[in-house]
Image (cartoon, helix red, strand yellow):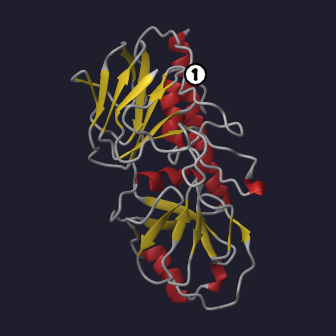
Amino acid sequence: MLEVVRPGLQSTVQDLGRPGFRHLGIALGGALDREALILANRLVGNPAGAAAIELVLGAAEFRFLRDGWLALTGADCGATLDGEPVWHGWRWRVRRGQRLLLPAPRHGMRSYLALDGGVAEPLVMGSRATELQAAFGGHQGRALRAGDRLPLGEPLHHDGAIGALLRTSDQCLRILPGPEFDEFDAAAVNALWQEHWRPNSASNRMGVRLDGPELVRSRGRELPSHGVLPGVIQVPPGGQPIVLLADAQTTGGYPRIGCVIEADLWKLAQARPGERLRFVSQTREQALAARREWWLYLNRFEWIAYGQMH
């Protein structure tokens, strides 16, 4: 088991979410930085979608109640294990009774702690992800608290540490034009591409609210309710866009000016309030190529990790 000594700002159990339930109004959910979760799991030999812990701005501490392995990805907290530095993006051996301290990271928002065997909370609709709005999944449907004890899966057997080359962010979000893109005036379209956008502190797991120029529609028609997905950029009447994230609702009525491509959603998960972001136009072909590039990297890393474990 894993004991929570200090939970930090908002630490939750997350995996890759609940695909296949949107017709019931249930969000995909799961880790906001999916790539970081997958990489952490691969480092400790777990399946890509095993449950791990997502931490917001660190400031947490955990105690291990069994021997095993850990990996930390996402925002680098400069973690220590019983006072000794733990390398970010590496598999690391832990012993029963040791304590992992994760200070606040200098950059980024979310860190991921994976443990061999994964966090073994009960499955709810095929997932262990925490759904905070509906209060189910994860550990009792809520953020972790001091004193919580999380069950872990069976420990795995490894020979040594391995590491992976981690990403760097350029703060450019590649987007595809949305269904209502042509309904915005020339000034709005120019602002979308030319201006900087800053995440608002009111952002959460449902979506990132962006501060910047007002985006005005040239057509004011009412829209019927329509399906939305993570990455969709909605523009409410106030003209300040909202980029939907994993816990977002499944339908909406605001115009969709664009959609952040899948390969760049992790940048929103790691963007802090006030940081400058830019939008860059992409074609469907470019978006698919970006997704293939990332999955090829993950697959190459998995082959290396497998070879070192066998």
Front residue of 179/27: it is 27
- Which residue appears at 44% of the width and 60% of the height? 172
- Which residue appears at 75% of the width and 78% of the height? 224
Q: Secondary structure at mark 1?
A: helix
Single out the residue that lies furthest toward the left: 83
- Which residue appears at 68% of the width and 64% of the height? 228
Residue 6: x %, y % from top left: 32, 36
- Which residue appears at 33% of the width and 39% of the height? 76
* Vertical arrangement, residue 49 with respect to residue 28, above or below: above
Residue 269: x %, y % from top left: 46, 52
Residue 116: x %, y % from top left: 50, 20
The C terminus: image quadrant = top right
Task: Evaluate whether residue 165 shows in this view.
Answer: no
Report the number of numbered marks.
1
Residue 226: x %, y % from top left: 74, 70
User: Circle 1 is placed at which residue position?
Assistant: 303
| Image quadrant in which you'd find residue 101 | top left
Q: Is residue 145 left or right of residue 227?
A: left
* Vertical arrangement, residue 36 with respect to residue 207, above or below: above
The amino acid marked with disc number 1 is Trp
Q: Is residue 251 left or right of residue 159?
A: right
